[in-house]
Image (tube, rainbow, N blue to C red):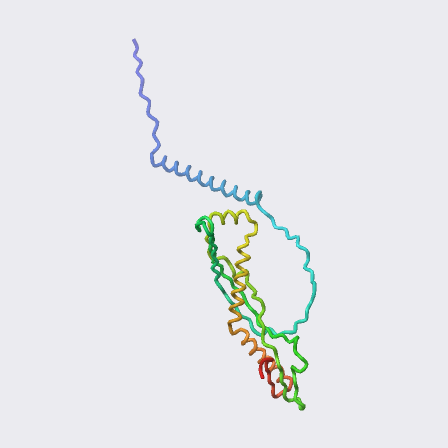
């Protein structure tokens, strides 16, 4: 009776753990690179299509010139001003967290001072018989309205109650901005009136006329103002 003997088969060689770890990291790195490419590609496609983007079309009519006026005044000086408007509004029977606001607004602008020559009387300029001396009588300098610089004027800080926030959300044109600009203009105008701006304009006008008249041949130039004796 023949006996069949079976020879044991050799086991398949196992892959080293270090090599398996490297292969796993390669797969992970490749997956991350693919994910980044997909995200970047999707962003590029989205930005190109831009389904929610807005486009601005300017359909304004051409500017129409309504009138031209001859200028008969001398812009003698200009002052630059800055003011911080602290505007607080409180409700009578509600706490500030519910109803009330406080806004800090930085207003920056300029005020021009000028001397108006249009209203000079006929005897405002007197010349000596030998035409070597001249006397000029001028009105005092006046102030223009403040000109706020929109690029330098802004809301610095603002605190609002819940009801004020809801009202601002529902309103398309909040009124507090306009009120802040008006207050800033008023305060700048008051500061300009109490400053030395008009006196500086009077001095500059006087120096300008003296230089101009002397260049015309007058050796003695006297510039006085209407309120001077």
Q: Whole-percent x and y of residue 10?
A: 33, 24
In this rendering, is residue 122 above or below 81?
Answer: below
In this rendering, is residue 160 above or below 137?
Answer: above
Q: Residue at x 55, y 49 (%)?
A: 171
Q: Whole-percent x and y of residue 70?
A: 68, 71
Q: Residue at x 51, y 71 (%)?
A: 194
Q: Whole-percent x and y of residue 37?
A: 49, 42
Left or right: 20 as drawn, with respect to 144: left
Q: Residue at x 39, y 36 (%)?
A: 24
Left or right: 48 as drawn, with respect to 100: right
Left or right: 168 as drawn, with respect to 71: left
Q: Residue furthest top?
A: 1
In this rendering, is residue 77 above or below 59?
Answer: below
Q: Whole-percent x and y of residue 65?
A: 69, 62
Query: Quick one: quadrant of the N terminus?
Result: top left
Residue 131 or residue 33, whichever sits in front? 131
Query: Quick one: quadrant of the C terminus?
Result: bottom right
Left or right: 160 as drawn, with respect to 205: left
Residue 182 or residue 148, whichever sits in front? 182
Res. 224 image quadrant: bottom right
Residue 212 or residue 51, whichever sits in front? 212
């Amino acid at each position: 009776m023949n006996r069949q003997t079976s020879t044991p088969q050799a086991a398949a060689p196992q892959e080293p753990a270090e090599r398996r770890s490297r292969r796993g990291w390669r797969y992970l790195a490749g997956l991350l690179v693919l994910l980044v490419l997909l995200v970047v590609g999707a962003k590029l496609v989205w930005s190109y299509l831009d389904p929610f983007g807005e486009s601005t079309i300017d359909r304004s009519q051409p500017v129409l010139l309504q009138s031209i006026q001859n200028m008969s005044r001398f812009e003698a000086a200009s002052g630059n001003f800055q003011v911080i408007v602290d505007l607080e509004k409180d409700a009578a029977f509600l706490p500030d967290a519910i109803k009330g606001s406080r806004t800090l607004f930085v207003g920056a602008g300029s005020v021009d001072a000028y001397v108006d020559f249009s209203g000079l009387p006929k005897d405002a300029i007197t010349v000596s018989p030998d035409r070597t001396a001249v006397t000029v009588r001028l009105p005092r300098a006046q102030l223009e309205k403040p000109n706020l610089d929109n690029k330098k004027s802004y809301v610095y800080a603002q605190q609002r109650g819940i009801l004020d926030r809801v009202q601002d959300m529902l309103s398309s044109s909040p009124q507090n901005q306009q009120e802040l600009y008006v207050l800033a203009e008023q305060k700048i105008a008051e500061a300009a009136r109490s400053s030395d701006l008009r006196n500086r304009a009077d001095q500059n006008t006087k120096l300008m006329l003296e230089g101009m008249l002397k260049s015309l041949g007058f050796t003695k130039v006297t510039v006085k103002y209407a309120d001077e004796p």
